[in-house]
């Protein structure tokens, strides 16, 4: 018997085949395609590459690319740049405000003087930051109303006219030390028995309520249009940062806390738009 010839892979790819069309009635045969397996695979691969390249060029050079993940439109890129610039401006503004708060804490603890604080504020004011004003819509107005109601730490949401001379006295007692800006004594010392109630001079929001080594328990309240009151050397404080207080409401109790004290008393300061003023000009103790 004759042995069967083994077909290699090359032989299989080289085998040719024909595609014929046969007339149903006459059974006449007509050759349509004559090709090998290798030629058919190569042609299919080339056609695939052509279609893939055409699809890529169509997507890349037409607006269709905006519908694919990873591509952005020109408008979106411009908005991203603008938002990035605004975010940078807001970050700088946040840093300036943080520096001001830290300077105010240093002033309360006696680490810096009023002149140094004024210089720090002056340097911050020279770095003006301008933000684009965006027109508000109805949704923005509703959101703003909700935030103003819920954000208890916002010390600048109280609307009112310039403060008048009618202010509630924090305590009633004799003054042991008067206001003297030349000696850097920016308030008045009122002699009071320990644990006497301390009252808020007007409605406002507590912006500082902590212990300091130099002045003991300190509470600071932000009032109308830049008016700030400061109460030092308290034995305890009953209001926390962010609390709203009313006129005459008890906020602390007098004491003798802190390093810079010689007896039970209340050190009271009154500031207007960042500058100390004499409390005796507005309050009758």
Image (cartoon, grey):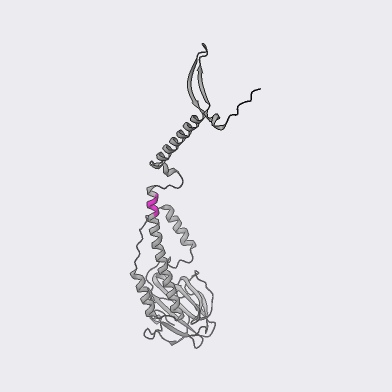
**Residue 122 picture quarter:** bottom left
- For the point 46% across and 85% down, which residue is it? 190
User: In this orientation, which residue lies closer to the viewer: 40 or 27?
Assistant: 40
Locate the C terminus and report the quarter of the image it occupies: bottom left
User: In this orientation, which residue lies closer to the viewer: 92 or 245?
Assistant: 92
Image label count: 0
Q: Residue furthest front?
A: 1
Q: Is residue 79 magenta?
A: yes
- For the point 48% across and 63% down, which residue is it? 151
User: In this orientation, which residue lies closer to the viewer: 19 or 77?
Assistant: 19
User: In this orientation, which residue lies closer to the viewer: 162 or 82?
Assistant: 82
Q: Position of residue 224 (x, y in %)?
A: 41, 70
105 shown above or below 260: above
**Residue 84 picture quarter:** bottom left
Q: Residue furthest top?
A: 26
Using residue 239 as the reference point, say whether residue 129 is left or right of it. left
Q: Is residue 170 visible?
A: no
Q: Position of residue 43 (x, y in %)?
A: 47, 31
Q: Main secondary structure of the magenta part?
A: helix
Q: What stretch of residues is rendered in magenta?
A: 76-80
Q: Position of residue 14 (x, y in %)?
A: 52, 28
Q: Is residue 24 magenta?
A: no
- For the point 49% across and 26% down, which residue is it? 35
């Amino acid at each position: 018997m004759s042995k069967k010839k083994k077909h290699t892979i090359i032989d299989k790819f080289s085998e040719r085949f024909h595609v014929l069309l046969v007339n149903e009635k006459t059974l006449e045969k007509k050759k349509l395609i004559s090709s090998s397996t290798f030629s058919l695979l190569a042609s299919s691969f080339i056609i695939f590459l052509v279609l893939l390249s055409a699809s890529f060029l169509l997507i890349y050079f037409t607006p269709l690319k905006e519908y694919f993940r990873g591509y952005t439109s020109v408008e979106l890129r411009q908005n991203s740049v603008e938002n990035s610039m605004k975010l940078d401006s807001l970050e700088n503004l946040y840093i300036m405000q943080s520096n001001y708060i830290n300077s105010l804490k240093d002033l309360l603890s006696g680490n810096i003087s009023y002149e140094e604080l004024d210089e720090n504020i002056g340097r911050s004011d020279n770095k003006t930051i301008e933000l684009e004003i965006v027109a508000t819509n109805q949704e923005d107005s509703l959101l703003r109303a909700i935030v103003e109601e819920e954000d208890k730490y916002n010390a600048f949401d109280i609307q009112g006219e310039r403060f008048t001379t009618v202010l509630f006295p924090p305590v009633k007692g004799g003054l042991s030390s008067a206001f003297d800006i030349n000696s850097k004594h920016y308030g008045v010392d009122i002699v009071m028995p320990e644990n006497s109630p301390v009252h808020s001079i007007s409605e406002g929001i507590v912006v500082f309520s902590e212990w300091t080594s130099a002045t003991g328990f300190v509470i600071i309240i932000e009032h109308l249009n830049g008016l700030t009151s400061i109460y030092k050397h308290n034995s305890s404080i009953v209001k926390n940062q962010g609390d709203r207080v009313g006129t005459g409401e008890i906020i602390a109790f007098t004491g003798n806390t802190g390093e810079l004290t010689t007896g039970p008393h209340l050190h009271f300061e009154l500031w207007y738009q960042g500058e100390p003023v004499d409390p005796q000009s507005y309050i009758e103790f």
